[in-house]
Image (spheres, rainbow, N blue to C red):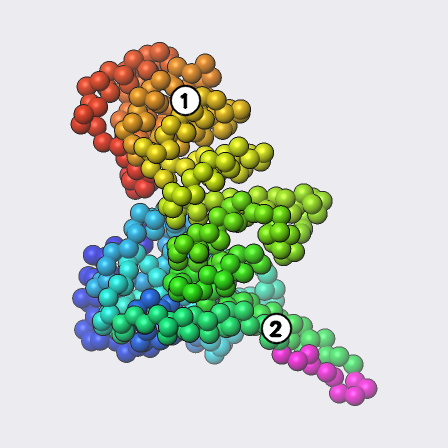
Amino acid sequence: MKASRGSLRALAATFLVQLAPNACFAQQALDVQMQLTKSTILLGEPDWVSVKITNRSNQSLRVDTSPACFITGSKPLHVEIPAAEPGDEQAALCNQGRGGDCYSTSADIAPGETYTLQYVLDGDFRITHAGTYSVMLEKPTRYAPVPPSAPPSQSTPLNDRQTARAQITLEVLPANADKLLGIERSLVQEATAPIVDPPFPQPPKNQPYDVDALRRFTYEQRKSDVQQVEERGSIAEGLAEFPAAGMESVFDQWMITGFGYGLQALMKLNTPEARKLVAEAADPSDDLYLRWSQHVHVGGNLPVEATTQQELANWQVAAIFRLLTMGDKSYLPLLEKLTADNRPEIRGATIRGLCQFGGDEVLPFLSGLASSAATMPDRQDAILSMGETASLKAVPLLIDLLTSPYSDESEAASYALLKLTHHQIATADQSTPLKSQAAWQDWWTRNQHTARAFAPGEACASSR
């Protein structure tokens, strides 16, 4: 779990002197240096933390650049800016990937060699005003010696650990929309630049190839390719987290070509044009489908058309989720239409997501689905979505559903009531649907004027 603001402030107090922007801590066999890519930025401009890991030992080391992100909740880079405004901490709690890229792989670093990583300067904070900010960084690293004969792909337990910390000053200048747009357009060129490989070594004339030299060349080339891909991905991630108005067409193209950050950038931008483009992806026309399908990576054992259709469904589900998150209720008719799609994954994503628009407006539609949807999964999804509307008007509707003739729907209604109200009836009152309904009705009669409806984010926070 990410360190709290209080613990990081306490950590800052232990520093006796202000560290330089490239503060370095040497621990065990590694030197780790951290610095900001830019120490002065415009308000709203993305920035990155460059982390240089140097092997000071006399043997090759395998370094894990993203320790157990999704298992322990730890982040490969902790970032804190105490003077900034609080960010969306509930979203950060539920999204373990924030505060550093969890998809980086381990790297083998030879003695004296330096490996560079780049992380987006992001976390549970928002910088909304120009000024001077103190940025506090903490980088955990795990590593282990690489046996001389071990191939790069061989798994190695990384049992040695170290942590580097730094405090860096960031100057944030007032917003300038034109300059920011120019900066982001330049960053797009860096993010999409082709991978450059070194020239293939040629042996002297009439001489055979040196097999060992070729093997070393292939290994170094592969390592260079991975680093270049990670650098470009980090730039794209930064643009997606801090998009500038006027970049909608670029992010639309990224979305269509499969560049993974297009949808995220449009969701963050959330302009009318961005919402229009995401809505088109949620319910694509034949023309958009043809443009998109040209970039689908086909693999596995499924036929090409089946693979393409499955990828399209995945793409639409991602677009539906983001359109719901953008909160524009003018798209509610489109989303209600998608609940009748012939693909269960599209129906399920839309029905479960409608709760994000708020209960009072979508409850009648969800209640109707809970009673009349053609399949049991759809009816269950509608019931569960009713429990996430943060509306007390859902309570009596869910109580009525407790005596559904289908046991799965009755169980879904009981769970939805628990999530919505955070009230749990006694075990003895749950022995039959009728008893459960009577217990809930009694509670509701006594508490309907004082009860509180909990939002899904609050449920997430209470269950950690």
- Judge by depth and name the residue closer to the eye, 70 or 300: 300
Q: Main secondary structure of the magenta part?
A: loop
Q: Residue furthest bottom?
A: 205
Q: Looking at this view, is 415 or 103 the one in front?
A: 415
Q: Which residues are magenta?
A: 198-207
User: Of the residues tagged 2 and 1, which is closer to the observer?
Assistant: 1
- At horizontal 19% and vertical 19% (from top left) the residue drawn is 446
Q: Which residue is mark 1?
A: 411
Dot 2 corresponds to which residue? 221
Q: Of residues 94 and 365, which is closer to you in this image?
A: 365
Secondary structure under tag 1 reads helix
Three-letter amino acid code at the position of disc 2: Gln
Three-letter amino acid code at disc 1?
Glu
Crowding around mark 2 (Cα neighbors within 10 Å: few <14, some 14 to 19, many 20+) is: some
Residue 202 is a magenta residue: yes
Residue 366 lies in magenta, yes or no? no
- Looking at the picture, how far across and down is residue 259, in whole percent? 54, 59
Cα distance between the residues tagged 2 and 1: 56 Å
In the visual, does 140 lie left or right of 307? left
Q: Is residue 181 above or below residue 444?
A: below
Q: Residue 426 placed where, x, y %? A: 28, 19
